[in-house]
Image: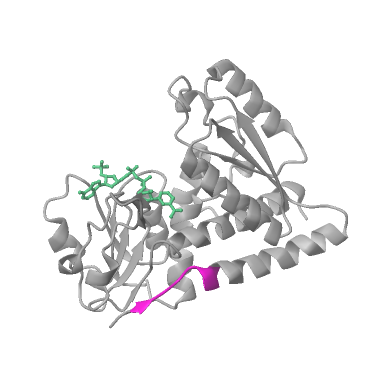
Amino acid sequence: MGQLIKGKAVADAITAEVKNHAEELRQKGTSPKLKIVRVGQREDDLAYERAAIKRMASCSIDCEVLSLSLDISQEDFIKELKKVDQDETVHGVLIFRPLPRQIDENAVKYIIRPEKDVDCFNPINVAKVMEGDETGFPPCTPEAAIEMLKFYNIEMKGKNAVVAGRSMVVGKPAAILLLKENATVTICHSKTDNLKGVAGKADILIAAIGKSKMITGDFIKEGAAVIDVGINVDSQGNITGDVDTEDCIGKVSVITPVPAGVGSVTTAVLAKHVLKAFNQLTGK
Ligand code: NDP
């Protein structure tokens, strides 16, 4: 029987470390600040926003939300982003995506300077992550997946790691981060022939597909570590992962639950990034 590894202990450890540093800064009369930029009122954005506000408070990091109307023009959105970028009291910026249709991501993704771009929207950060440049910011979710593996002492070096999903937000950066840890990495996607066969060779499987419980026990190698990044809502309205945990638990060594798995670590990584952005911007 495999072990269910939860995110809370990982998030608590990261939170304690960030809080420690942020409080030292506060005693010196300064503090890191996150600005969240939200367009419209999507329920999943609002849920993440609430979690991020709570996490920043427990890390002693300031947090403000810029809530913009869903029908904002691209021109006005650019003006707002420029103001946020130039605001010297703001050290980290998180922009919820996808943006509404009238805003072309390509026209806005360079506006927030890479030093403040704490969730890897700016392509300069993407390049830094590819290069292994430590001043860059990987997206928080794949970094949270790696934090889970590290915290629970899952060896990545030399292991066969399979990432199911190739988005810029999760799949591709997860693969790059695994490579940095010296895993041998395979990326799968919707056109992959025989996903079951490929996933079945993985010592480490990261599922980031967006299909409720698609990964069943017959995709899993005996003793694999399985990290489920998926957040889906099933037909009964329940939050589910991409992995059928009950079906897999007998085969895995460790597996993350959904909810209470990777998702809970993501905001802690975000707080860590805001502190790092503050340090890099101010030299403190
Ligand atoms: P996307 O929809 O952008 O990407 C999904 C990826 O899965 C694509 O690369 C797609 O392939 C691939 N895929 C789809 N169907 C299959 C299939 N049948 N077999 C193999 N691959 C398939 O999703 P995201 O990357 O944004 O998110 C993935 C999941 O992670 C979602 O459930 C999302 O809610 C969750 N998520 C969780 C977060 C957290 O904090 N825990 C944060 C962000 C996302 P192709 O490229 O060929 O289309």
Q: Is residue 73 above or below residue 275?
A: above
Q: Specify the quadrant that holds the N terminus.
A: bottom left
Say which of 131 and 219 sits in front: 219
Tell me which segment is drawn in magenta.
Answer: 3-10
Does residue 119 show up? no
Q: Which of the pair 77/193 is nearer the observer?
A: 77
User: According to the image, what is the colour scheme of the structure?
Assistant: one colour
Would residue 235 be found to the left or right of residue 274 on screen? left
Name the foreground residue: 53 vs 118.
53
**Residue 180 in picture, x, y percent from top left:** 42, 61
**Whether residue 34 is visible:** yes
Quadrant including the C terminus: bottom right
- Check residue 25 for magenta coloring: no
Q: Residue at x 64, y 50 (%)?
A: 53
Rendered location of residue 203, percent (x, y): 27, 72
Q: Residue at x 43, y 23 (%)?
A: 101
Left or right of 265, for residue 256 = left
Residue 87, located in which quarter of the rendered image? top right
| Residue 267 falls in image quadrant | bottom right
Residue lying furthest bottom: 1
Q: Nearer the viewer, residue 207 or 172?
A: 207
> Where residue 133 sits in the image (x, y, percent)?
53, 52
Residue sticking out furthest to the front: 236
Image point (38%, 68%), residue name: 256
Residue at horizontal 48 percent and vertical 66 percent from the top: 147
In the image, residue 275 lies at what x, y percent? 68, 55
102 to the left or right of 2:
right
